[in-house]
Each structure stands twice: as C-alpha cells, then as structure tokens.
Image (cartoon, rainbow, N blue to C red):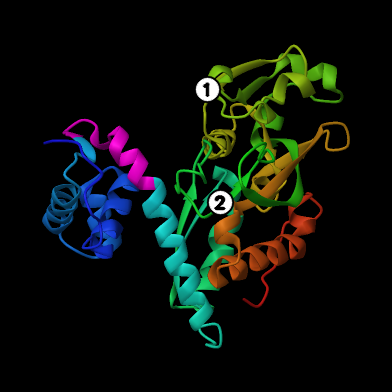
Amino acid sequence: MQKNTSVRLEHLNWDDMRYFLEVARTQRASAAAKRLGVDHTTVARRVRELEAALRTVLFDKSRAGGFVLTPEGQRLLSYADAMETTVQSASDQFTSGAQTLSGHVRIGSTEGFGCFVLAPQLARFTDRHPDVSIDLLPVPHFVSLSKREADLAITLERPERGQYVYTKLCDYRLRLYGTQDYLQRHEHIGSVVDLRRHAFIDYVADLAFSHELLYLNRTIPDVTASLCSTSVIAHYHAALQGNALAILPCFMAAPNPQLVPILSDEIVVTRHFWLSSREDLRKLRRITALWDYMRAAADANRSLLLGESAEMQFIDA
C-alpha cells in the first residue's frame, strides 16, 4: 500500500480515529474492542477503513506483537491524541453546568499503593459517581502519561521532563516486619547488628523500576535476601509465611495483626508519592474531581500512611 499522507482528510471519520487510538494504546484489537464495547472484527474493519482513507499503513500486525504502530501511525497518533483531548475539553465546556460527572479515567499507580489504598478508595468514588468509569493500573513498573497509558499517575519519583502538572501526594513510611511465629522460632533481635543472622525478602536489584525501592541494604547493611521479587505484594505474602523478614509499607503491613514491626524506632524508611497528569488533561472535570479526591483521601489517611494508625479512613466523594 502506498504511503502518502498528503491525501485530503476532510472525509475522515472521527469514530475511525477513536478506534485507531484504542488499538494504538492496547496493541490488541480484542482489548480495544472491549474498551469500546464492540466486536473485535469491527475494530479491525475500522482500522482498515482508516488506513484506506489515508492510503498508508498505520500498524504492523503479527500474532506475537499485536498491532505495532508504523512511523506513519506514530505521526497520526499525536494528531489523534490532540483531537481526542479537544473533543473532551469541548464536551466539558458545554456540560459544565451539569451536576453529574461522567467519562472514563485511567489511573496508573505503584503496585502496593494501588491495591491496598487506591482500590478501596476508588470503589467509594465510583459508587458516588456511577457515570465515571475507572481503569486502575497497580503495576510494578512506570506507566507512561505521554503514551496515554494513563491519564493520572502516582509514582515514586517526580516527573523530570514533559508537559505535566504534578504535586506531592503524600509521604509514607516503611518498617521491618515479620510474623510472631518467625520471631519465636528464630534468634532474638535486640539491635540492627542481630539482623545479620536473619533471612530477608528483597527486590530483584537489576529489575527494580526505581532506585527508591533498593532500601534494604541501605537500611540494614550486610544482610542476605533468601527470596527476591519485583513485586511488593509478593514480599507481603512471602513475609506472612513466617520464614523471612521484609521491609514493607506500613499501609500494607500495619492493618494485618499477623505482621509485627521489628526495631520500629531504628528501622524506618520514608518515601513520597507524586501525583501527575498531562497539562492538556488536567482541567477536564473528571480528572479534576479524581485529582482532588485522591489528594483529600491521602490527607485523611496520613496516619495510616505514616504507620501511626492501622485503620483506613474514607471521605465523601
């Protein structure tokens, strides 16, 4: 198929661009179809129609890789993305007087915070605002705002570059935890030096997505990890088996009575979460509502996040 983007575009169908965007983001016709609420054959057909209208190939397709953008597809993506944002902003302008929030928001988050804090908080939000649908992505890696993998992101590190709006969401603390059974079966721990004779759970150093996660050896020198994982939730469940110790976020470990803090005044790690969004999305009503809600929820749960309480607080959405 000849690649020629100089073709007149006045007859392009915006719906075709929506299909293109979802395929570009998910790289699968089936995944795009699920998000759009149609059959996957419809998605494939609309993409073909768009390619025919533009007289160019937008995706390289394979069973293994799915739909991968060609250079022409990458060029179109920036335009389609801007069109979508413009349409969303226009919709917000003309419905600003309406009381009901609506639309779709995708939120990327670190794994532990997403599962243990955001999930219950967002469940309350969607109950209060049933016309807002949320994709929560609690994953052990960075989520790209620039590629529209998410509309809002909660990260360990502040965005360094790009057209983003960001704020410090909260501080949180981590402490060393083990089960009571572990402590009864192993040598007494009276000081940090005693920890050298104990087994630990840690991150896979060369696969950790942020250096902020590599706190074990900085906090407790000369200890050995018997089990490593890229997932903090794996650390949590492994520690519950009572065979090793783990440094865990207090908001995960403190609510579970099976886990006991060890040397809690000596082994304390403080980290921060940052909340960010693309500038062009930040003023959308549903983005603003969730931004404000998550900040208020974090403020309400300051004691839980800092390990001073084991109880989660909920606010009005």
Does any portion of residue 101 appear in the rendered image?
A: yes
Q: Is residue 44 above or below residue 133?
A: above
Q: Position of residue 77 (x, y in %)?
A: 36, 46
Q: In the depicted view, which residue is nearer to us: 121 or 209? A: 209
Q: Tell me which residue sits at (62%, 29%) in the image.
A: 210
Q: Secondary structure at mark 1?
A: helix
Q: Tell me which residue sits at (73%, 18%) in the image.
A: 217
Q: Choose top left, top right, bottom left or bottom right for residue 285.
A: bottom right
Tell me, for residue 207, which label it has, or none: 1
Q: Secondary structure at mark 2?
A: helix
Q: Residues within 10 Å of mark 2 (few under 14, many from 20)?
A: many
Q: Quadrant of the C terminus?
A: bottom right
Q: In the depicted view, which residue is nearer to us: 238 or 54? A: 54
- Asked if the stretch drawn in magenta spans residue 63, the answer is yes
Q: In the depicted view, which residue is nearer to us: 200 or 142? A: 142
Q: In the depicted view, which residue is nearer to us: 48 or 258? A: 48
Q: Is residue 11 above or below residue 225?
A: below
Task: Tell me the CA gap for discs 1 and 2.
Answer: 20 Å
Residue 213 left/right relative to 240: right
- Asked if the stretch drawn in magenta spans residue 2, the answer is no
Q: Tell me which residue sits at (67%, 43%) in the image.
A: 259
Q: Give the magenta range.
A: 61-77
**Amino acid at pointer 2:** Gly
Residue 125 left/right relative to 214: left
Q: Position of residue 43 (x, y in %)?
A: 18, 55
Q: Tell me which residue sits at (65%, 68%) in the image.
A: 293
Does any portion of residue 104 appear in the rendered image?
A: no
**Amino acid at pointer 1:** Leu
Q: Position of residue 95 (x, y in %)?
A: 49, 83
Residue 53 left/right relative to 76: left
Q: Residues within 10 Å of mark 1 (few under 14, many from 20)?
A: few
According to the picture, the residue beneath numbered tag 2 turns out to be 114
